[in-house]
Amino acid sequence: MSNTYKLSGNSEASAELPSYSGTLGPDVVDVRSLYAQQDVFTFDPGFASTASCKSEITFIDGKEGVLLYRGYPVEQLANNSTYIEVCYLLLYGELPTATQLSNFENDIRTHTMMNETMLRLFNGFHHDAHPMAMVSGVVGSMSAFYHETMDIQNPRHREIFSHRIIAKLPTIAAAAYKHSLGQPFVYPRNDLDYSSNLLNMFFSVPADDYEIDPIAVEAIDLLLILHADHEQNCSTSTVRLAGSSGTNPYSAIAAGIAALWGPAHGGANEAVLTMLGQIGNAKNITEYVAKAKDKNDSFRLMGFGHRVYKNFDPRATIIRDMCHKVLAKLGRDDDPLFELALELEQVALKDDYFVEKRLYPNVDFYSGIIYRALGFQPSMFTVMFAIARTVGWVSHWQEMITDPEHRIGRPRQLYTGPKTRDYVDVAKR
């Protein structure tokens, strides 16, 4: 269907632009011919109203609080699936049969080890380097180790890359964590499932036996599922944009990790813990809630509200119960931060200001509390997000590479700088 649009400010100008409907969500207007027809660009800072691609992977309805992976509600996957099964779904588009799942899981398990030379790269980082700096750097270096399978036009090479990066991200992340602590690296174990293996590499030490808590495994698997993909967010769009140049996939994923590091994106759950530390005690909540309501105060409550969801974040609804379950089992009674977090949650859920503005606790609020209860340092929270989101990045990269309409990303701009000027010799300035 095509519609004719008149351009504001010029009554003579109009453009006939086609519109398309997806299976769900708003229609889109195809503006690709607008510049050729009328010599104008569209202007959309932050791309909040721009569909940058077609995708079959994830759908979000922010008004209704809906999140679908390949058409499956995230609530159903969280209650019935495992992270590895969700990885298969995102990569291949369908839930696996028992045989397909077994083969896929086995392939992931047997690709978890890192090349020893790659492992030694960590010794080049300062001991107090942020783990995200180490992880993004090491992932970027993987193109130097696996260059024989980086033909992005080769389907088998793309599949090998996909399995390899999903398998090795927990190993790389755990190595970064161990390096920051000065502890020995812990090698992966093929007898453990994905989340159990992750916990073992993070928290076991050669001097002691480490008992993997089933509640911790359940919590990690749930967090990974809930963070596996989230449509065309900042880091996913970064992976697509970097990958659109034809660069190797490891570089594209490293770019996504760097984008995720920002406090407005993957660093939000770390910021929640920082905020709770700033509030300090439950008795100070009233004061800080008042500060959050004051437009002239720079203080903001982190972990509340969401740019896309205008209703309750469906992931937060799921993770809230797990948060309380983890705190009941693993939360330390002497840690006032947990008491503070739960009290702040209740205040925000009941306060008219937050209810009217729909500033409900989001997934970042609860995930940070869970990670702290499980023993992760705040600097590792975003790394855990990166582990979960890797499969989403890979799925979108694969989709983009195989899209016949794929072109290198090249946004345009509204130029507001000086008009043409003539050069003046330095002696005359």
Image (cartoon, rainbow, N blue to C red):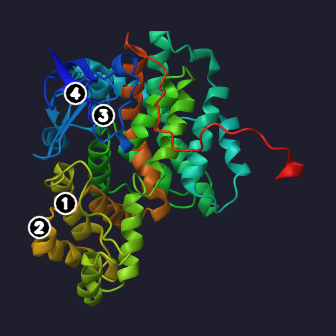
C-alpha distance separating marks 1 and 4 = 48 Å
Crowding near the residue tagged with mark 3, few <14, some 14–19, many ≥20 C-alpha atoms within 10 Å: some
Front one among 387 and 411: 411
Circle 4: element type: strand
In what quadrant of the picture does the N terminus appear? top left
Of callouts 1 and 3, which one flags the residue occurring earlier in the amino acid sequence?
3
Q: Is residue 111 above or below residue 291?
A: above
Front one among 252 and 45: 45
Residue bearing the label numbered 2: 355
* Residue 305 in sight: yes
Q: Position of 374 compared to 306: left or right?
A: right
Of callouts 4 and 3, which one flags the residue occurring earlier in the amino acid sequence?
4
Residue bearing the label numbered 3: 50
Q: Is residue 253 above or below residue 283?
A: above
Crowding near the residue tagged with mark 4, few <14, some 14–19, many ≥20 C-alpha atoms within 10 Å: few
Query: Please, what is the three-letter code of the amino acid marked with disc 4?
Result: Lys
Q: Nearer the viewer, mark 2 or mark 4?
A: 4
Query: Please, what is the three-letter code of the amino acid marked with disc 1?
Result: Arg
What number is the disc on residue 6? 4
Residue bearing the label numbered 1: 320
The quadrant in which residue 43 appears is top left
Query: Please, what is the three-letter code of the amino acid marked with disc 3?
Result: Thr
Crowding near the residue tagged with mark 2, few <14, some 14–19, many ≥20 C-alpha atoms within 10 Å: few
Q: Nearer the viewer, mark 2 or mark 3?
A: 3
